[in-house]
Image: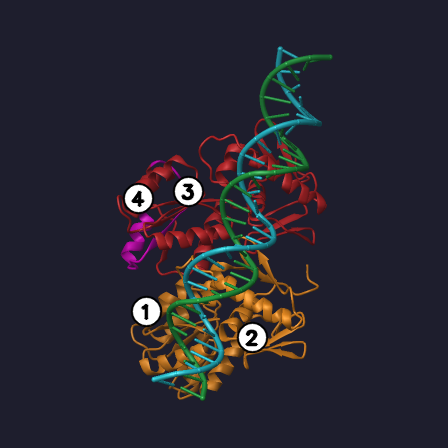
Chain colours: A red, B orange, C green, D cyan
DNA sequence: AAGAAGCCTGAGATAAAGCTTAAAATTTAC
DNA sequence: GTAAATTTTAAGCTTTATCTCAGGCTTCTT
């Protein structure tokens, strides 16, 4: 899952980025409103975290512009102002939720999950066949047997399963899991698909990830067409 | 374990904070109902201690709002009023327990322990494998052999064991054990993990704390998946 | 059937995360 | 006020994850 943080204070931005990466998100950071808006409009994020008071273009203005461009990406705004008025302003401008600073990291995570969950409406249990993954504890089970994955392996598998029964193109994978935007002819994806297949095979979940030649990969729910 | 005290009288608030910190709790204090409610809603505490008579928003109203927001955090209320009526009022508003002022600090501690114990319903003895810890006396036993820990070591181990079989991320650990919110660039956790591992190893409980690279640590109950 | 394009995989290089140690800073105890 | 204990910082070292690359294999096209 790919997030964009627009926050000018380096301390907070760094803390957020590190913490969210621990949770296996791919995180971009912009330090002012203008470059943040640029990134938001030119890339496909799963969620934006926008501070209220930022230079070059206020958080509220970023919200408005993003919505004006037709994007429905969930937006969480961070604010020190906590009057009702500000909250109304923010939500009116197109934000989906807000958090008052100072906040606790876990609350942020919970709110992010809410947004991402409502995005994939019907689907809040992440599983495919006998495989199930738990983003909260970072665990993967094949039946009752736990599989140990590295962070990148987990992020890739999570992305594939969140998009199960849909083809994931190589460019989307590289954007959402690796956070690489420019065209580069890397074969990391291939390598990690191999890693995953090997571990899944060893746990009895072989053949879950299928190759769509020339396009990408797909995880299919067994029993579906 | 992280507590929030909402109490307007600085003398009592300070006394509680100091005393509870000696017991290795991470303690925040709010001096009125409004700011207390804010903190309670934006952070994840393990327990709230709320005085009845506080400015800006009464203790009972704080309780109601917290419950209304869906939080199940244990709430202990402090009151000078000791009529049955008041108690019923408080408990109806969502409090879990109450203490009449003036109270003995030991009694408060005991009641806090009760609340924290019922939190992990299924398992109220804090243990993992042959290791068991006693929050009341701050003792740690590996089998029958006692291990001596410093306060921070104990707090860290307690947090890990209270969350056993769950991954504790670095950011959660730093928030709940150190009460630090915006410092991503410290290696205290690593150092303390080393301290703990060394002492546990010497007592024959090696290998209890496992590293989840890129994420944090986990204590697993041996014999579980 | 042969060539081309895309994919897989193993080996090795690079980078990052975590571990350990020592020493400085802080707190506590006497 | 001094000494001891605890906590924190910082640096070098170790381990592990990540990535690159090259050669081989598979699938598709003609």
- The spot of residue B205 in percent (x, y) is 65, 69
Q: Residue at x 67, y 44 (%)?
A: A200
Residue under label 2: B117
Q: Is residue B51 above or below residue A197?
A: below
The answer to whether marks 3 and 4 mark residues whose Cβ atoms lie closer than 8 Å is no
The answer to whether marks 2 and 1 mark residues whose Cβ atoms lie closer than 8 Å is no
- The spot of residue B92 in percent (x, y) is 45, 75
Instruction: Say the numbered circle drawn on residue A33.
Output: 4
The answer to whether marks 2 and 4 mark residues whose Cβ atoms lie closer than 8 Å is no
The answer to whether marks 3 and 4 sit on the same chain is yes
Q: Is residue A30 visible?
A: yes
Element type at mark 1? helix
Q: Residue at x 38, y 86 (%)?
A: B81
Task: Identify the subunit bearing mark 4.
Answer: A
Position of A141 with respect to A162 (left or right) is right
C-alpha gap between disc 3 and disc 4: 17 Å
Instruction: Say the numbered circle drawn on residue B34.
Output: 1
The answer to whether marks 2 and 4 sit on the same chain is no
The answer to whether marks 3 and 1 sit on the same chain is no
Element type at mark 4? helix
- Find the magenta span and give its range: A69-92
Q: Nearer the viewer, residue A106 or A178?
A: A178
| Crowd around label 2: few <14 · some 14–19 · many ≥20 (10 Å) | some
Q: Is residue B154 above or below residue D30?
A: below
The answer to whether marks 2 and 3 sit on the same chain is no
Task: Identify the subunit bearing mark 1.
Answer: B
């Amino acid at each position: 899952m790919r997030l964009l943080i627009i926050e000018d204070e380096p301390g907070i931005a760094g803390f957020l980025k590190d913490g969210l990466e621990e949770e296996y998100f791919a995180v971009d950071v912009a330090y002012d409103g203008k470059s943040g808006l640029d990134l938001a409009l030119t890339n496909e994020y799963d969620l934006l975290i926008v501070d209220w008071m930022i230079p070059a273009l206020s958080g509220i203005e970023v919200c408005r512009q993003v919505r004006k461009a037709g994007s429905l990406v969930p937006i969480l705004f961070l604010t020190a102002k906590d009057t009702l008025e500000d909250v109304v302003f923010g939500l009116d401008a197109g934000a989906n939720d807000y958090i008052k600073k100072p906040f606790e990291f876990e609350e942020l995570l919970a709110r992010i999950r809410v947004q991402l969950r409502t995005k994939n409406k019907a689907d809040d249990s992440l599983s495919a066949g006998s495989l199930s993954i738990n983003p909260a504890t970072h665990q993967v089970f094949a039946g009752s047997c736990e599989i140990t994955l590295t962070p990148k392996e987990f992020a890739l598998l999570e992305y594939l399963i969140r998009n199960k029964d849909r083809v994931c193109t190589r460019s989307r994978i590289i954007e959402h899991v690796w956070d690489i935007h420019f065209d580069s002819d890397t074969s990391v994806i291939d390598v990690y698909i191999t890693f995953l297949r090997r571990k899944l095979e060893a746990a009895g979940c072989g053949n879950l990830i299928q190759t769509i030649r020339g396009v990408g990969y797909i995880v299919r729910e067994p029993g579906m067409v």
